[in-house]
Image: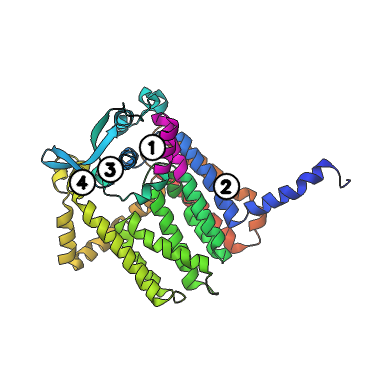
Amino acid sequence: MPESHPSNWLRQPWKTASAFATTPLGTFLIIATLSILAFNLLIPVGTGPDESRHIFRVAGLCSGQILPIHFGFFDGIPLWGGKIPLPFARALAVSAQPIAPDWAYNHFYAQVPFGSEVTKQWLEFSNTVVYSPVPYLPAILGYSVAALFGMNVLGTIVLMRICAGLFYITTIGLVIRLLPSPGLKWLTAVIALFPAGLFEASIVTADTVTNTVLIVFSACLAAAVFGTKPAARPLLVTLLISAVMLGTVKPTYAPLAVLVLGVQQIRIWLRLATMAMTVGIAGVWYAVSNVATSGMGLMRQGDDRFHVVSSLQLSGILHDPVNYLRVLFHTTVLYGNEWLAQSVGQMGYFSRGGLAASVVTFIVACGALLLAARRLRPDTDRLWVCLLYTSDAADDMQCV
């Protein structure tokens, strides 16, 4: 066939694309993009874990409500939350139903929630008002752009979801490219492709940024500690930044920053400063937001709402740490199969499109791996890594 034949013009680009698709970065980008898109389009708004309350938190932050606001009592329990545009409150009020309706049939989603004439309503969201603004930055970007163009409620929420997914894909993709070891690249890609993680990256939640920071921190730490060659400066800088962010996304993760002390390539004063900064930021935010935990009981039903007292839980741990460890071990041994399955298979409150989205995610994963089979077959390690992901996805399908 002559070299000028049109088929020859496409042969090299196809080979390049095919080779990229079978790399850790290519496999992650393809599966993550298609899976997050499927979840984004098929999961009804508000059916993710506490998604409505996370949306309220974003709306409050964009209105300047940074710290928890106390605005009343219900049955003796303090109410913590903020003033939210009424269209959001009306559109998402249905999400408390056992089976959420399809958002396409909710006319409140067509209302525009922006403008000085829009009425605002006090709403309680004690469990999300304690989060710092940092894990909501992608959603805040989407909300701000939607406000700039005067989008309706549905468009605003979808745009917030898209921004969260782009942040997850872009950040982890850059880290995979940064890692020096092919094996670590594949391991990071597989962990980032757990279906539950992809689901949370497709809804409005603080967990999207939290999961991303944890994956970045873990991958960079593994490369710096276990790598056969000295880690590059960009990787070490990324490690330090992610360590500091641990204290901003969730204070309970701040103690993980102590692991930075094991990275000998970083000067000791910088390691100590990073750890101190992480713990300090977490401590400051905990001090100013912990008051809102007094309203956590509203997340329970009946008399159980009066049994959620965070101060008593904390004092119990501090005064009897041995009993705490005993309970933790007891729970892990007896219920390990349940929390492990939920940690990788919990994909929200399924209704209508939820199950369909999980099916699409599994099909996309298998399809991508089949396309890469020829390149993966000679490499046993890569093949087993991909099979691990496929079996995990299949297990998640059984969970739903």
Q: Amino acid at mark 4?
A: Met
Q: Amino acid at mark 3?
A: Gln
User: Which residue position is annotated with label 4?
Assistant: 296
Residue at image location 18% in from the left, 45% down from the top = 295
Q: Which residue is nearer to you in this view: 31 or 242?
A: 242
Residue at 47% across / 75% down in the picture?
Answer: 265
Which residue is identified by label 3?
A: 65
Front-most of 245 and 31? 245
Residue 127 shows in the view: yes
- Residue in the image at 44% along x and 63% along y: 218
Front disc: 2 or 3: 3
Within-10-Å neighbours for mark 1: few <14, some 14–19, many 20+: many
Task: Give the camera-side residue of 63 and 193.
Answer: 63
**Which mark is first along the chain, 4 or 1?**
4
Residue under numbered circle 2? 30
Distance between the alpha carbons at the discs numbered 4 and 2: 39 Å
Q: Which quadrant is home to the N terminus? A: top right
Q: Residue 318 vs residue 116: left or right? A: left
Q: Is the residue marked by circle 2 packed among few (<14), some (14-19), or many (20+) residues within 10 Å?
A: some
Asked if disc 3 and disc 4 are in contact, CB closer than 8 Å, the reply is no
Spatial CA span between label 2 and label 1: 25 Å
